[in-house]
Image (spheres, helix red, strand yellow):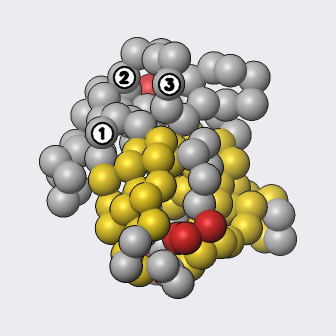
Amino acid sequence: METDDDVDLFSKAAPATETGPGLADGRSPRGLTPGGWVRTTGWLQVGDHPVSSALVAAVVGLLGAVVVAAALVRAQPVAAGVLVLAVPVVCGGAWWLFTTRLKPASPARNVGTTTADELVPGDNVRLYGTIGPVGQVAAVTIGEDVEVDFHGGARESWPRDRTVHLVRLLG
């Protein structure tokens, strides 16, 4: 899937670089694309704590398994029980494998909001609202609109009063 800036969010992870989004310990995040964006997981937060997307996948698997098990319980009670136990594990494990190995993505936590005209170089921001990929601000030019340059070469033009979500990359 390519964005308006021709960044393929499903491309292989880029090698570690000296510039662009990074973790607090200096490592490159999982899911760093060649265009400088970071694919993220953990779209659900409870307070300040992100909920693992693998846990969300497991809960969805559990809900599906309960529906199927309800239909099977009279004819195949053992199979119904196995479904309720196994499907959430398989769903959560498959999602974890997908986001750590096949198409790496970094867990991230939204840490606050600011307006576009208050961004400074080095800020990690969500590009499309409260969820989705993260980019690191390289430069900000304030005019009638705010021109935000990101590491990797992408550029966004936002109204001065646009609310932008600041992010902390966790892994």
At label 1, the amino acid type is Gly
At label 2, the amino acid type is Ala
Res. 1 visible in picture:
no
- Residue 6 horizontal side relative to residue 164, left or right: left
Sequence-wise, the earlier of marks 1 and 3 is: 3
Residue 136 picture location, percent across and down: 51, 44
Nearest to the eye among marks 2 and 1: give it. 1
Q: Residue at x 50, y 25 (%)?
A: 19
- Quarter of the image where one finds residue 36: top left
As drawn, the label of residue 47 is none
Residue carrying label 3: 19
Nearest to the eye among marks 3 and 2: give it. 3
| Relative depth, front residue between 140 and 37 | 140
Residue 2 picture location, percent across and down: 18, 51
Residue carrying label 1: 153
- Disc tally is 3
Q: Residues within 10 Å of mark 3 (few under 14, many from 20)?
A: few
- Quarter of the image where one finds residue 7: top left
- Residue 37 horizontal side relative to residue 116, left or right: left
Sequence-wise, the earlier of marks 2 and 1 is: 2
119 up-or-down from 38: above or below: below
84 up-or-down from 96: above or below: below
Residue carrying label 2: 14
At label 3, the amino acid type is Thr
Residue 134 picture location, percent across and down: 49, 51
| Relative depth, front residue between 28 and 40 | 28
Q: Label 1 vs label 3: CA separation?
A: 11 Å
Q: Residue at x 41, y 45 (%)?
A: 150
